[in-house]
Amino acid sequence: MKKNALIIFVFIALFSCKSDELNQDRFKIGTFEIPEGKGYEKTIIIRQDSLQIEKYEDRIDSLSITWKNNFNYTLKMLHPKTAIDEDPIYVKITNIKKDSYEFEAVIGHSNFKQKGTIYKK
């Protein structure tokens, strides 16, 4: 019985999302970029504490960012201009590389998922 539990524990540890891969603040603070393409305009993101500023096209948006854990966070527009801007954006980090991560984002409680990659500058 103990042997089975140990095997399951090792399996989970090997294949789960490791928090040491996401060096606590590596993607929580700094300047990032989403390149143009796949439904995105080139976007520059600046994160400090619980604030995220996004610069794209001729717009600048300010959002609050709340981290649930190292792999999930929620964005909320500070000054929404439309009804859809009032909905929170739920973001899940799905893959991590040295200076980037892939994500899936859902606005509000819709079923539409948008995928992309954010690069740390």
Image (cartoon, helix red, strand yellow):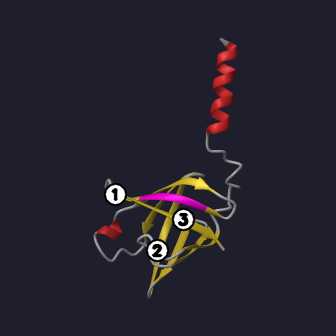
User: Among all residues in the image, which is located at the extreme left?
Assistant: 83
**Near-viewer residue (107 or 87):** 107
Residue 41 picture location, percent across and down = 45, 78
Question: Disc 2, disc 3: CB below 8 Å?
Answer: no
Mark 2 or 1, closer to the camera: 2
Instruction: Find the distance from the CA under tag 2 to the CA under tag 1.
Output: 18 Å
**Amino acid under disc 3:** Thr
Magenta stretch: includes residue 102 = yes
Relative vertical location of residue 86 with respect to residue 15 in this rendering, above or below: below
Q: Which residue is at 51% across, 58% downward?
A: 103
Which of the numbered marks, if any, corresponds to residue 117?
A: 3
Q: Which residue is at 65% across, 19% downward?
A: 5
The answer to which of marks 3 and 1 sits earlier in the sequence is: 1
Kindly identify which residue carries mark 1. Answer: 112
**Amino acid under disc 2:** Gly
Kindly identify which residue carries mark 2. Answer: 37
Q: Please count the marks in the image.
A: 3
Q: Quadrant of residue 10?
A: top right
Relative vertical location of residue 103 with respect to residue 54 in this rendering, above or below: above
In which quadrant is the N terminus drawn?
Answer: top right
The answer to which of marks 2 and 3 sits earlier in the sequence is: 2
Q: State the SS at label 3.
A: strand
Q: State the SS at label 1.
A: loop
Q: Is residue 95 left or right of residue 40?
A: right
Q: What is the magenta range?
A: 101-105
